[in-house]
Amino acid sequence: MPAGGFAIDHERWIHPKYAFFLPVNILSSVFRAKFVDGLRKAFRKGTLVLSGSIARLADPKRFASFVNSLFKQQWVVYAKPAFGAPTMVLRYLGRYTHRVAISNHRLLAFDGQHVTFRWKDYAHGNKQKKMTLEATEFLRRFTQHILPRGFVRIRQFGFLTNTRRSTLLALARKLLATTPKPAEDSQTGTAISSTWQCPYCTGEMRIGPNLTPRQLASRCRPLDSS
């Protein structure tokens, strides 16, 4: 997530307008559209199982009517701020991208038939426990972590794609050294970004800091009712 990107002419770096990754309302609309599109494709291919109480949806007209009705409701997408600092996020992802399914120090014993290893029970206070499995079952679980041919754990895209990464990274660093960052609020230090124009005065509307009612009262002047 580079939080920005090149202009079309590659002459400047464009910083994001907002201090968050994706607007939740737009995210819910996009997710709904993609989910419904997947349902339609599965129905056309005949891979969608419609049985029991929804067996009537096997009729194409009824299915189309049902799918169209999904757009009449607002879908909810759960999103929350990232936990901790970026280093914590990288450490969390690193467990899955640069490690095998189980590290050697967790393997405790092997008697030729069974494998004993240590595991962490997250449901009960992260307690360390031991588990013994038959060797074939242990291997079955281990091989589930092996990616199929053609799959990779990390797939780069955009200016990080393998064919042009070195050239574009150098250009990005050069532009970032000369491209000014978005303006910041003098009191909070948070970015103030342009969003749209006011429909009444056509002035630039900006996102400011979140204020408490007391702070709002101290900043706002009373209206003149005379």
Image (spheres, rainbow, N blue to C red):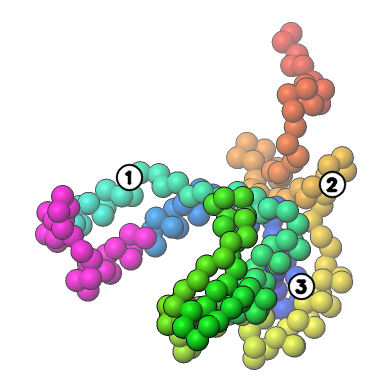
Earlier-in-chain disc, 3 versus 1: 3
**Which of the numbered marks, if any, corresponds to residue 12?**
3
Earlier-in-chain disc, 2 versus 1: 1
Camera-nearest residue between 38 and 207? 38
Earlier-in-chain disc, 3 versus 2: 3
Q: Position of residue 161 (x, y in %)?
A: 63, 84
Instruction: Using a 10 Å C-alpha cutoff, classify the residue at mark 2 as few (fewer than 14 neighbours), some (14 to 19) or many (20 or more).
Output: few
Q: Position of residue 179 (x, y in %)?
A: 83, 67
**Which of the numbered marks, if any, corresponds to residue 72?**
1
Quadrant (top left, top right, bottom left, bottom right) of the C terminus:
top right
Which secondary structure class fits the magenta region best?
helix
Circles 3 and 2 in contact, beta carbons < 8 Å: no
Tag in front: 3 or 1 = 1
Residue furthest front in the image: 111
Tag in front: 3 or 2 = 2
Please determine whether, in this image, residue 178 is positioned above or below residue 203: below
Residue furthest top in the image: 226
Picture residue at 33% right of the left edge, 64% below the top: 37
**Which of the numbered marks, if any, corresponds to residue 189?**
2
Instruction: Using a 10 Å C-alpha cutoff, classify the residue at mark 3 as few (fewer than 14 neighbours), some (14 to 19) or many (20 or more).
Output: some
Identity of the amino acid at label 1? Lys
Q: Position of residue 20 (x, y in %)?
A: 66, 53
Identity of the amino acid at label 2? Gly
Circles 2 and 1 in contact, beta carbons < 8 Å: no
Find the magenta span and give its range: 35-62
Was residue 68 drawn as part of the magenta stretch in this picture?
A: no
